[in-house]
Image: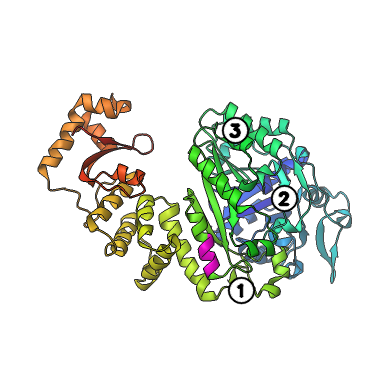
């Protein structure tokens, strides 16, 4: 029996399939996991499955892979007519009857640990009867048989899934589940169709997390829908990670920021910078919208807590918005965007409503005039409150936020640029119009081209030399740039400046003072690892004053790329 996942990207991995295999326990040696991506060639995937010659193939189905999996199934059934095909996962737990016409034999509905184990025993060992397996649907003659609801599993009964495969997970994100379920009932989320909340024992969690720490795993992403929904449980895990941290692993949590209190924030301040990463769903700041989707959020408290965490400067925060929700007009989304953007989180995720099977908004779509694509991922096209064209404009803005803000390519230039527009949203809106007018969306661009486009867009709105300085600063903060675009005056023809730079790297006293970590390197090596650049303004002071105190003067900044990117003002050049 093979368990198959088509992940969205190579770096992703399937926790679901590993949980199914681990729960099958004594049978797990006869169950093999096969992971592909949606970018793999279809024929390659089919051939790899065919070579295994399994009795059954079970696919993990989601909105991003369902179409591809259906096509794979259609071909497999032609070349392997006796193969039993099983579909499971979020995408097929609702409105699944049509799949029996696509070559699917069995649907696993809801969580699948117990049903998968029973199906394995039935298919591979001939034990039991199909009708007795809870949580499945299958076709018998012309009739679709639906057995009773699946039996839920206690999370401690699922063995830890990574003991035997951690070496296979290099360069992949590792996912971990400490709780299952969600206490909230947001109508755009599939969790709204489920009830109940279960937790792993803390003893088990500590043991599992210590394994990750000991193995120097780069990142572990908790898949818990709202990690901090039980305060003492969340604090116990955070406290354990803080106390046992050895400086290697980052842990990602999806949290409800408005439920954090002073005790939790005080604990979080003790975390090493980079130990934790938070994903926080704001979705909208429109009160009527939040009421209509049954989302109970105190946005004022959420924003206050985001700022408290930001002030500690030790936790990266990702804030999420969703366009296309009920009562959210283009104008009100503009406000939601500005409210969140002004917090300047490390990442701003601008998503679009997916009208998922099983979620409350699918049932209420007609009520709110929500029209969406009929094929996965069921993305909103327009609603009573926002038009198709307006959503397309937001798509272009989303693309620019990803290219410039979330990539950190031009973080200070963007902070400067919004001062020339009424709001942050207006900057992105006008930039999107400029981008589309010039057809930049029709081709891909390298990093330097992206900087050039931004420079061209802003050049007529501000002092050209100041703009060059801050863009140059952003470039060097991102990369040890070997050559600048032509529009950057980098003083390449200034022989005196070149001599100053050469003298700096040859001066052991100076380099030991500013880059002591490179003390054993030669001058030539130091000049390759670091970059000394002249600016026409005191850019550090300007940034620290929120672009209010502009001092025109020659300033040298040393960029050190030996361990990440660090920079410092050099006063003695």
Image quarter where the C terminus lies is top left
Report helix, strand or loop for mark 3. helix
Report helix, strand or loop for mark 1. loop
Q: Does residue 523 show up magenta in the picture?
A: no
Kindly identify which numbered label has been placed on residue 383. Answer: 1
Nearer mark to the viewer, of 1 and 3: 3
Q: Earlier in the sequence, mark 3 or mark 2?
A: 2
The residue sitting at 38% across, 38% down in the picture is 564
Could you tell me what secondary structure mostly forms the magenta stretch? helix
Q: Is residue 563 visible?
A: yes
Q: Does residue 334 show up magenta in the picture?
A: yes
Q: Residue 44 location, x and y as percent?
A: 56, 58
Kindly identify which numbered label has been placed on residue 267. Answer: 3
Q: Which residues are magenta?
A: 331-336
In the depicted structure, whether residue 517 falls above or below residue 275: above
Q: Nearer the viewer, residue 499 or 9?
A: 499
Q: Residue 405 location, x and y as percent?
A: 43, 54
Q: Nearer the viewer, residue 375 or 337?
A: 337
Residue receiving disc 2: 182
Q: Is residue 88 visible?
A: no
Q: Nearer the viewer, residue 63 or 318?
A: 318
């Amino acid at each position: 029996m093979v368990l198959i996942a088509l992940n969205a990207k190579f770096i992703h991995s399937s926790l679901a399939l590993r949980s199914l295999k681990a729960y099958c326990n004594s049978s797990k040696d006869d169950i093999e996991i096969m992971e592909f991506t949606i970018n793999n060639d279809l024929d390659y995937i089919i051939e790899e499955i065919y070579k295994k010659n399994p009795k059954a193939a079970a696919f993990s189905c989601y909105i991003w892979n369902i179409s591809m999996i259906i096509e794979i199934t259609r071909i497999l059934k032609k070349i392997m007519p006796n193969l039993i095909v099983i579909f499971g996962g979020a995408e097929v737990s609702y409105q699944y009857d049509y799949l029996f016409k696509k070559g699917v034999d069995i649907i696993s509905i809801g969580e699948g640990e117990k049903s998968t184990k029973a199906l394995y025993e039935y298919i591979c060992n001939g034990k039991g009867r199909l009708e007795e397996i809870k949580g499945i649907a299958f076709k018998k003659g012309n009739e679709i048989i639906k057995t009773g609801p699946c039996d839920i599993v206690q999370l401690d009964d699922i063995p830890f899934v990574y003991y035997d495969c951690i070496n296979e997970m290099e360069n992949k994100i590792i996912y971990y589940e400490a709780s299952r379920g969600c206490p909230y009932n947001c109508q755009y989320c599939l969790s709204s169709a489920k009830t109940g909340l279960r937790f792993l024992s803390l003893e088990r969690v500590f043991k599992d997390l210590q394994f990750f720490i000991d193995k120097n795993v780069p990142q572990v992403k908790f898949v818990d829908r709202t990690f901090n929904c039980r305060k003492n449980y969340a604090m116990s895990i955070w406290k354990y990670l803080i106390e046992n941290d050895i400086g290697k692993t980052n842990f990602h949590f999806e949290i409800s920021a408005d439920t954090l209190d002073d005790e939790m924030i005080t604990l979080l301040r003790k975390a090493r910078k980079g130990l934790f990463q938070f994903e926080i769903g704001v979705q909208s700041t429109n009160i009527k919208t939040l009421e209509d989707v049954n989302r109970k959020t105190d946005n004022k408290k959420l924003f206050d807590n985001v700022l408290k965490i930001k002030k500690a400067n030790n936790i990266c925060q990702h804030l999420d918005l969703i366009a296309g929700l009920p009562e959210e007009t283009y104008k009100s989304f503009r406000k939601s965007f500005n409210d969140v953007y002004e917090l300047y989180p490390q990442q701003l995720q601008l998503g679009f409503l997916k009208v998922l099977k099983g979620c409350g908004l699918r049932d209420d779509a007609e009520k709110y005039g929500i029209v969406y694509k009929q094929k996965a991922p069921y993305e909103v096209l327009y609603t009573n409150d926002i038009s198709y064209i307006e959503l397309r404009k937001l798509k272009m803005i989303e693309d620019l936020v990803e290219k410039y803000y979330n990539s950190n390519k031009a973080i200070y230039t963007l902070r400067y640029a919004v001062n020339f527009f009424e709001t942050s949203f207006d900057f992105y809106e006008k930039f999107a119009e400029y981008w589309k007018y010039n057809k930049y969306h029709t081709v891909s661009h390298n990093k330097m081209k992206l900087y050039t486009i931004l420079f061209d867009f802003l050049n007529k709105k501000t002092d050209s030399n100041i703009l060059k300085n801050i863009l140059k600063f952003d470039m060097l903060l991102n990369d040890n740039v070997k050559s600048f675009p032509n529009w950057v005056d980098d003083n390449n023809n200034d022989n005196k400046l070149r001599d100053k730079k050469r003298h700096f790297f040859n001066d052991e006293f100076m380099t030991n003072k500013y880059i002591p970590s490179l003390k054993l390197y030669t001058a030539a090596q130091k000049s390759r690892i670091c970059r000394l650049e002249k600016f026409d303004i005191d850019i550090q002071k300007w940034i620290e004053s929120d672009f209010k105190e502009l001092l025109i003067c020659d300033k040298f900044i040393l960029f050190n790329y030996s361990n990440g990117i660090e920079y410092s003002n050099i006063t003695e050049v």
